Amino acid sequence: MSTAVLEEKRPETANRPPVINDFSIHVATANGSGSQSSNNILMRSIFQMGIPVSGKNLFPSNIQGLPTWFTIRASKEGFIARRRDVGVLICMNPETAHEDVKTVAPGAAVIYEESLKLDGLRQDVVFYPVPFQKLVLELVHDGKLRRLAVNMIYVGVAAWLLGIDMAEIEKAVAKQFKSKASAVEVNMSAIRGGLEWAGKNLTKRDPFRLERMNATAGKIIIEGNAAAAIGCMMAGVQFLAWYPITPSSSLAEALIDYAGRYRIDPETGQPTFAVVQAEDELAALGMVLGAAWAGARSMTTTSGPGISLMSEFAGLGYYTEIPAVVVDVQRVGPSTGLPTRTMQGDITSTYYLSHGDAKHILLLPGSVEECYSMAIDAFDLAERFQTPVFLMSDLDLGMNNWMADPFPYPDKPLDRGKVLKTREELEAHIARFKEFARYRDVDGDGIPWRTLPGFIDSPAATYFTRGSGHNERGLYTERPDDYQRNMDRLARKFDTARRFVPRPVVSNGSGSRVGVIAYGSSDFAVEEARVILARKGLPIDYLRLRALPFTTETADFVSAHDRVYVVDQNRDGQMVDLLRLELGPHATKLRSIRHYDGFPLDAETVIEGIEAGEKR
Amino acid sequence: MSSTTPETKAPTAETKAPATNRVGLSIKEYGGSKSTLCVGCGHDVITRQITQAMYEMSIAPHKVAKLSGIGCSSKTTAYFADRGHGFNAVHGRMPAVATGALMVNSSLIGIGVSGDGDTASIGAGQFVHLLRRNVPMVYIVENNGVYGLTKGQFSATADAGSKLKTGAVNDLPAIDLCAMAIELGCGYVARSFSGDMKQLVALLKGAFAHRGTALLDVISPCVTFNNHESSTKSYKWAKDHEIPIHEIGFIPYFEEIAVEYDPGTTQDVELHDGSHIRLRKLREDYDPTSKGQALSLCLEAQAKTEFLTGLIYAEPRKKDFLELSGVAGEPIVSIPDARLRPPKKSLDEIMESLK
């Protein structure tokens, strides 16, 4: 039976206006049941129909059995933050089915396994019972494939109910299974079976519809971790040491995969990078410092608990002035519980990571494009400033699917910073400055020059690398004046960095006395909230932070507004705290909006926070 | 490869010019800053043997990466090979720093100096993984059974029953670093005594000639905190109890092997660079290339509190970590920037695949 015939049989919703390209689909399954492919196919099909889309995996810390949700948002206006209300629920997990049904918005459509008998739970939603288990027996003859293929049936049912173009589904299936004919065939037949069954047996009573648009042409879909991995590869990373930790592992794995394809020297066949899977995060940063000391562009990737373990080495990197890039894909807290949920949880701990007077440059990517571009920036800044630089992504950005424009090729060459690599460079330096002294500020920017082990055969090139107690020549000292002079230079270097880190993105001009400051993955929800608030007659200005230390724009923005709301995805307002320290008298203008339930931020939270504040 | 006459020139009465080695350097040029350790410290003796071994091996000093953690032993990397680069890392974490540095520059000659606290306690985890990976470097543990810099606490290599100066008795068994290293696949495992200079310098030269991790566990008495009567890491105890398992000669690849040997009493171990270690057996039929014998020897010595020294285990043909990782060729740090960033067509190809 063709799709066209099915189209004719589908009645329009009687008395509710259709909701076109502006709702979210929530798929509830058990972890490990193989729903990921089905969800990707759903999302990609919508994307291929030209409708802006985002996909989020709200998953447990578990391999098999615990509940997991995948939420796909279609938005004709291009809003890709998480949407709080669910329009279409697909209930495949008996464990959570009752709870799932209770949480959807009134008027939602609920597709569910018939035997779960959910239709008595609510009167204000539209139920579509589907005999998935019976259908899979008919549609899939290979018993081993049924567990996975059952998920394809809901793709077919949803396609019929929502009007997803089957041609797009076929394309998405081919992409998902890399055109492997047998897999494509089995899955397509399950999808078609679902579609046909729905056509014969269901009557559409909900308002949700997808209609072709032209808003995604030329765009890509990518996870932030893959984007950052591509950035690191294009930055010319030479050394990666890492320890597996959710949600950062996929970054290291994507980098190994991409670099294995694009970073093999065609002449020698040797990789132009080295990778070590370290014994722990502590060792990972130690290896990175060793490799960077030897002159390699070096990085590690981790999450909060790994950051804690890296603390001592982070301080050593600061004091010895060794470049390092640490990607922190932030998540909820230590140990078991919510390691697979998102949080902006490491802002203050990472900014001041380690002991003594250590502090660090943090980059705050707000999109997959910035995961890519800031990964490149991070290496340049780390080598320019000879210090660890932290790229602060998070689980929502890192592990979820985001629509983006294709990434541009880097327009600047690598900035390797102040390195004397050859005898000629060393001699020219000595001619100009009398000698090479590792920790002397000869340029007035706080940044000294360095040599690399094994490069120049001359006693004038060498120095000894040690922690806090060294003079300008790198010699051991415990003298108060030596120590203090060095600390002052490090402070000067950090001040220089303020002029080089990515500037905030400022959207002034709404004429409002109210502003909002946000950072990282909060951007999508904040932008959406601004549009909605403006429609409600409350336009607000916006400053999106892109780095720490703060730059002058931030103080200017706060001083130009009466009230500034700071959005944090943590309980205690880590960024608002840092801003208060920075701003002095203007700090009283700051108000804090905090989201910390483990799920990605949504626009409603921002709107409610600002509206509540403005009513006061 | 080998020349019939050693190129090391002896000083003559006429010129008084210092002797130089194959790379034209005198032993002075392998020196470092003045030691700040206690007078009589075993570590200073080891430093002198390291200097001697580097000189005799004609190592290019600017290629030397000296790596250490924290503790008295870890300070000593500043006391030799000033023309090399040194890195005093954090406590117990030298193996990680060494792994990173040596992975990206296959031309560096790595030497790590650590202590028993730095290696067997706080750094045990990293030590284990360094050995498992077979990172190419000489790893010396200056083992005195005690924490010196923090004034005399027991370390994890202190023998059970040994006493501190305060009279406190150590109830816990010692970690045998050599047995641990053999178990973990280390291809060059030796134990020595800072008082046995001839043996130590031969073992050090062998370690430099070995490819992969070479572990030297050197008993090095702490004159201030662990040199008293009831210590099993004192000079007196070590001198009285040292039992060499063989006499060790080292023949570098650039010297001809002149004397024939009797396989009944002598064993030759050929190292990666063509150098030979010649062992005159003192312990009947002990074969240091047998992992089983090597482990048994360690276990027996532990059981009898024997202080056996020499090359306990040798497996010179093992692949090191760089070879295993496919980066043993051109040093990664020498690759020019232009070859590090893929061309635009690579990025375009990736972007296309994501559409």
Image (tube, helix red, strand yellow):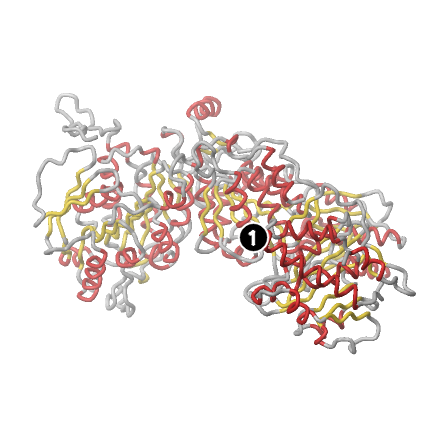
Count of numbered badges drawn on the protein: 1
Callout 1: helix, strand or loop?
helix
Within the image, what quadrant is residue B168 found in? Answer: bottom left
Residue matched to label 1 = A250
Taking the image as shown, residue B188 lies to the left or right of residue A398, namely left
Q: Position of residue A227 (x, y in %)?
A: 62, 45
**A133 to A289, vertically: above or below:** below
Residue at 20% across, 42% down: B270
Q: Quadrant of the C terminus of chain B?
A: top right
Residue at 76% across, 70% down: A103
Taking the image as shown, residue A229 lies to the left or right of residue B148, namely right
Q: Position of residue A106 (x, y in %)?
A: 83, 69
Q: In which chain is the residue bearing label 1?
A: A
Taking the image as shown, residue B182 lies to the left or right of residue A465, namely left
Q: Quadrant of the N terminus of chain B?
A: top left
User: Can you see residue A86?
Assistant: no
Could you say which is closer to the camera, residue A105 or residue A465? Answer: A105
Could you say which is closer to the camera, residue A193 or residue B222? Answer: A193
**A31 to B268, vertically: above or below:** below
Crowd tier of the residue under label 1, counting other residues whose Cα lies within 10 Å: few below 14, some 14–19, many 20 or above: many
Q: Position of residue A281 (x, y in %)?
A: 48, 54
User: Can you see residue B172?
Assistant: yes
At label 1, the amino acid type is Ser
Could you say which is closer to the camera, residue B257 or residue B137? Answer: B257
Within the image, what quadrant is residue B251 found in? Answer: top left
Q: Position of residue A375 (x, y in %)?
A: 60, 43
Direction front: furthest residue: A1
Residue at 84% across, 62% down: A10
